Image (cartoon, rainbow, N blue to C red):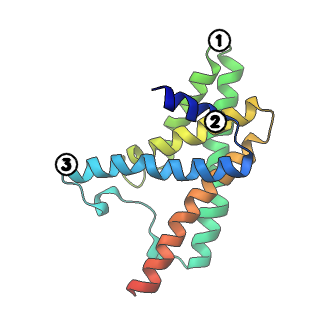
């Protein structure tokens, strides 16, 4: 347990670039066990739903998932709920903001499926926590969070591009 605490404290003080890379990778790593549990219970990847990547060009996919979605979702799922929590819940604003942010982030993805919304909960946690960390550090919490999200989504775009190139 002590190792986890040490790693957590090292994560808190990473320089922004390193923080973005490490956190983006953690978001993916923490989603893997949930995906595996879904498979154990008989769900297929197609049951999860998700963005229809076949109906959009690769450039459109990059613009939408690496630029537009991270900015929009950071506003809707981190900036607004965390701001409101800090304004109305002085005592537990970090915890209320964190939970509200995770729930809203998940709800923004429920249109794909309830299972997809559950799958993105770890990502919602890391994005909300990152926003709060950089807010406490008095650094650009909005842009760092958006860049983490963009980096994470760019990994998905690379995988989609590779699938298109090698499987079609």
Q: Quadrant of residue 85?
A: top right
Label 3: which secondary element: loop
Q: Is residue 40 left or right of residue 157?
A: left
* Residue tagged 2: 10
* Residue tagged 1: 91
Q: Residue at x 61, y 49 (%)?
A: 73
Q: Could you tell me how far apart the alpha carbons at marks 3 and 1 are, in whole angstroms?
A: 40 Å
Q: Residue at x 66, y 35 (%)?
A: 12
* Residue tagged 3: 41
Pick the front one: 1 or 74: 1
Estimate the x, y position of residue 60 in percent, counting from the top left: 60, 74
Estimate the x, y position of residue 30 in percent, counting from the top left: 44, 46
Label 2: which secondary element: helix
Is residue 69 at all visible to an observer of this figure?
Answer: no
Pick the front one: 108 or 34: 34
Q: Is residue 3 left or right of residue 89?
A: left
Q: Residue at x 30, y 63 (%)?
A: 46
Looking at the image, is 66 positioned above or below residue 15? below
Q: Is residue 20 left or right of residue 103?
A: right
Q: Could you tell me how far apart the alpha carbons at marks 2 and 3 are, in whole angstroms?
A: 36 Å
Q: How many discs appear? A: 3
Q: Residue at x 81, y 33 (%)?
A: 138
Q: Quadrant of the C terminus?
A: bottom left
Estimate the x, y position of residue 84 in percent, counting from the top left: 67, 27
Looking at the image, is 103 positioned above or below residue 2? below
For marks 2 and 3, the one nearer the N-term is 2
């Amino acid at each position: 347990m002590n190792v986890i605490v040490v790693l957590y404290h090292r994560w808190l003080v990473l320089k922004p670039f390193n923080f973005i890379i490490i956190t983006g990778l953690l978001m993916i790593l923490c989603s893997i066990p949930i995906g595996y549990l879904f498979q154990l219970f008989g769900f297929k990847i197609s049951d999860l739903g998700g963005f229809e990547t076949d109906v959009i060009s690769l450039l459109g996919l990059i613009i939408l998932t690496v630029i537009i979605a991270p900015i929009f979702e950071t506003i809707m799922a981190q900036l607004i709920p965390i701001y409101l929590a800090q304004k109305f819940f002085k005592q537990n604003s970090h915890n209320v903001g964190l939970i509200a942010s995770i729930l809203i982030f998940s709800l923004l993805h429920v249109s794909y499926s309830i299972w997809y919304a559950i799958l993105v909960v770890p990502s919602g946690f890391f994005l909300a926590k990152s926003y709060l960390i950089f807010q406490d550090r008095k650094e650009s919490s909005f842009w760092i969070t958006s860049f983490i999200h963009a980096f994470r989504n760019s990994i998905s775009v690379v995988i989609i591009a590779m699938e298109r190139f090698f499987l079609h």
